[in-house]
Image: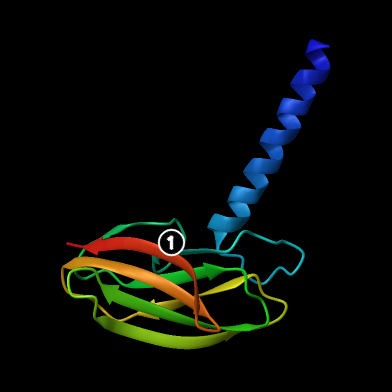
Amino acid sequence: MEKKESSLNIAVLLLVTVAMATILSGCYTSASVTSKPIVYTHAVGDFTPRDNFGRDEAIKIAVHGYSGKSVTFKIQNVATGRTIFQRTKYIPKDWNGMSINVDRLRPGVYYARAMVQGNRVGNWTFSVQ
């Protein structure tokens, strides 16, 4: 019984590892891989989700899911509620998601949001030092 349980644990661990590697690798064009919709920020060239950035770092907003839909990416200043960045992009049908560049931001705390057909589908809070 112990050997069967150990094999099951290894199989689950392998499945979770493959899923995380797919999400974090930035491989957005594989239609066979489906991921839970998620919004996050990351540095250009590094797909690891981050919530802290330096003032001169280039930032991207990423969204997973919503293949075949137009997604509106927004950045709002937490203190003022003001939208300081907004862009709508179509995610092709065979893609799992997309990331877009964000203009350099002043120090502060921000919300990164994704909207599909007027409904918020994801939210991520991050800061710029």
The quadrant holding residue 82 is bottom left
Q: Please tell me in which quadrant of the rendered image residue 77 appears.
A: bottom left
In this picture, residue 106 sits left or right of residue 50:
left
Q: Is residue 41 visible?
A: no
Q: Is residue 50 above or below residue 11?
A: below
Q: Residue at coordinates 31% horizontally, 72% vertically from top-left?
A: 58
Disc 1 marks a residue whose amino acid type is Asp
Left or right placement of residue 45 versus residue 69 in this view = left
- What is the residue that sits farthest to the front in this orientation? 119
Image quarter of the N terminus: top right
Q: Residue furthest top?
A: 2
Relative placement, left or right, of 129 versus 66 is: left
Is residue 51 visible in the rendered image? The answer is yes
**Residue 92, position as x, y percentages in the image:** 66, 83
Name the residue beneath numbered marker 1: 46
Q: Is residue 50 left or right of residue 6?
A: left
Q: Residue at x 39, y 69 (%)?
A: 44
Q: Position of residue 17 (x, y in %)?
A: 63, 42
Q: Secondary structure at mark 1?
A: loop
In the image, residue 24 sits, relative to residue 78, either above or below, namely above
Residue 36, given in percent of the width and then of the height, sits at: 61, 59
Q: Is residue 1 above or below residue 122?
A: above
Q: Residue at x 41, y 72 (%)?
A: 113
Q: Identify which residue is drawn at 48% across, 88% down.
A: 88
x, y percent for residue 78: 23, 68
